[in-house]
Amino acid sequence: MSEELRYALIGTPFSTFTRTIALGLHYKGLKFKQIATRAQSEIAQAGHPFAYLPTLIIHGIDGRRVDVKLCESQAITRFIDRTAPEPSLLAESGPNIVIEEKMWEFVSLAASFGFPMIEAGVVKPRIKALDEGVLSEANTREQIKDGVFELQRYLAIAESLMAPDGFAFGDHPTWADFFLYPLLADLRMVPEWDLVSGRLRRWTELMDTLPAAQTTKPGTLSAGARP
């Protein structure tokens, strides 16, 4: 089975978790077809029991046709790592990681807390207000003030778990970087980006230089797209 036909990724480029998986696939040089669709669509429902994004369709394993639909980002990342271990997206031992699971802890915190605190609490309501142009700046800030508090709380915790410079866990990107990056790339498009620390700004700029980040930018909020 050709590499081109082995994988299909279900999810709009606008979806942060879909971008996480696309980042990993591109970084590892795995060729795939992306099927752009929104959450709750019929296509999304066909891949995920709750019609969320993304789903990875695995057309072949070891030369066999299987057409397995694998959903939930952390399950997909583990499959990708198991079947394509190089280049590594796992954290190596270092000053801020004693065991590999600390990276997966960071991933889980980004998915479970970073996403709602950044996207739902700040980015989405702020973009809605900007696009509609109805609320004043003062009213918008009042509307999202609780979200901004939670945003700052999350960013401080995330930074405390990262290496002091470079990527999140050292000199090469890991899944921790690929889960956090789509969130901060979105946050950069709203005024609350001013609250982001110098360390996280430098990290975001470093992530921008990755070919995988540049390839996955079209269709995202950071490219001016909308759902």
Image (cartoon, grey):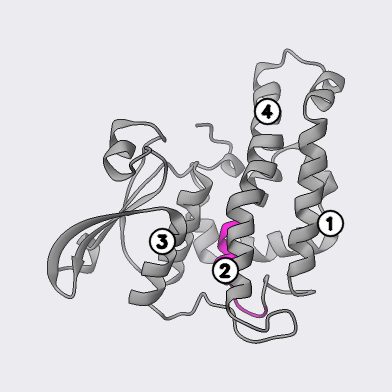
Specify whether 104 is left or right of 7.
Answer: right
Q: What element carries label 4?
A: helix
Image quadrant holding the N terminus, namely bottom left
Sequence-wise, which precedes: disc 1 or disc 4?
Answer: 4
What amino acid type is highlighted by mark number 2?
Trp
Front residue of 220/54: it is: 54
Separation of residues labelled 4 and 3 (CA atoms)? 29 Å
Q: What element carries label 2?
A: helix
* Residue sitting at the far right: 138
Q: Residue at x 34, y 44 (%)?
A: 48
Of circles 1 and 2, the one toward us is 2
Sequence-wise, which precedes: disc 2 or disc 3?
Answer: 3
Question: Which residue has dot 4 on it?
Answer: 125
Tell me: residue 106, above or below residue 224: below
Separation of residues labelled 1 and 2 (CA atoms)? 23 Å
Question: Which residue has dot 3 on it?
Answer: 75
Sequence-wise, which precedes: disc 4 or disc 3?
Answer: 3
Question: Which residue has dot 2 on it?
Answer: 104
Magenta part of the chain: 170-182
Which corner quadrant of the image does residue 101 belong to? bottom right
Q: Residue at x 77, y 54 (%)?
A: 155
Question: Which residue has dot 1 on it?
Answer: 197
Q: Is mark 1 on a helix, strand or loop?
A: loop
By secondary structure, the bulk of the magenta-drawn segment is best described as helix
What amino acid type is highlighted by mark number 4?
Pro
Q: State if disc 2 and disc 1 touch (CB < 8 Å).
A: no
Q: Where is residue 9 in the image (x, y as percent from the top left)?
A: 34, 52
